[in-house]
Amino acid sequence: MSRSPELVLGVDAGGTSTRAVVATLDGEVLARGRAEGANPNSVRRPAEALADALRDALADLDPQRVAGGVLGLAGAGAAGRARAEQLAARAWERAGLPGRPEVVPDLAVAFAGTTPLPDGALLLSGTGAVAALLRAREVARRCDGYGWLVGDEGSGVWIGREAVRAALAALDGRGEATALVDAVPAALRCAGGPPEGLAQRMVGAVHAAEPARLGILAPVVDGAARAGDPVARRITAEAVAGLLRSARALGPLDDGTPFVLAGSLLTRPTLLAEGVRAGLAGLGVRRPLRALDGAVGAAALAVREHGAGDAAHRRLVSEGQQEAGGGGLRPEPVRDLTGEVQ
């Protein structure tokens, strides 16, 4: 006799990486998977990346045991929801899974992976950037998160774009001297060759890759700012100011409900995170939570969809805390604009 479905899948798909978790209905994590980023607004093969993460997580499990799943996708807000649902359904089918998954914004899974409480706020800076209020674990209000072309102030891509612009301006005489003139081409792997062609090589490297790859320059700016470069410090300060504007636009903030910091630039020890934490304290948020694992959050939402309650959710959050505390969460690989690991 075939076994009844008793597992769920949770997926957190961002611009840099996609993580998947297989969990039991009572909140035990059985397996994990990982693949390239799957943000449909900034990568070239989002459906393939989603399917790869699902297959990686299910490598030693029967897909027919999966009762359902929740996929948290960057770019799955109202404007991109229909496309996100199509991508998710295509990936789900390619992974050999029955039925269809539920698609929610990545903000919802980041919040659910950090706290079992239903209401709170979240500020994210990774490949993209956005602030959000959550009510009953759903996004009730969001500020920014409009994508690399027209928004995402303070994101990794925004910082990377500003770094390239500053380096180009310094090269052609429009801007002040900066260490980014050397650091940016090195990160883009276009350094060397005749000096007069450097600007064009930089422009070519940027346009040859998807926008999400600009995020690899955020650590370059952080390093230059720590070394005292005034241009890098100014870019960092402007990124902090942009993120705090988004947080402030949510309305009055306090420590009475959870406030989650998400995205690699706010969950790692960056100058950006230091500035944002200091600014949030001035807004009344003195104990923000660091986001743990969005894929675990997606799994928590999935088990709730199948009748589990706070106990299973708390167990999943606890497992996420143990993974983070024990170094189990693998760091994101640093890649150049060609996608190769540096």
Image: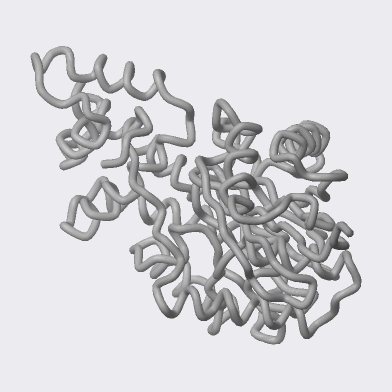
Residue drawn at the location 80% of the way across and 38% of the way down? 85
Q: Nearer the viewer, residue 246 or 329?
A: 329
Using the rendered image of the protein, determine whether residue 5 is visible from the camera's viewpoint: yes
| Colour basis | one colour
Question: Which residue is at 25% across, 25% downward?
Answer: 174
Image coordinates of residue 273 in percent, x first then y, are: 42, 66
Task: Give the x, y percent position of residue 289.
Answer: 56, 77
Relative horizontal placement of residue 90, taking residue 288 as reference (left or right)? right
**Of residues 286 and 135, the one drawn nearer to the viewer in this rendering:** 135
Estimate the x, y position of residue 183 in percent, counting from the top left.
19, 39
Picture coordinates of residue 208, whole percent (x, y)? 40, 19
Which residue is pictured at 73% across the width and 54% down the height?
142
Q: From the image, which quarter does the C terminus lie in?
A: top left
Relative to 293, say whether 34 is above or below. above
- Residue 108 in the figure: left or right of residue 12: right
Q: Is residue 278 left or right of residue 251?
A: left
Residue at the spot x=74%, y=70% of the render?
A: 24
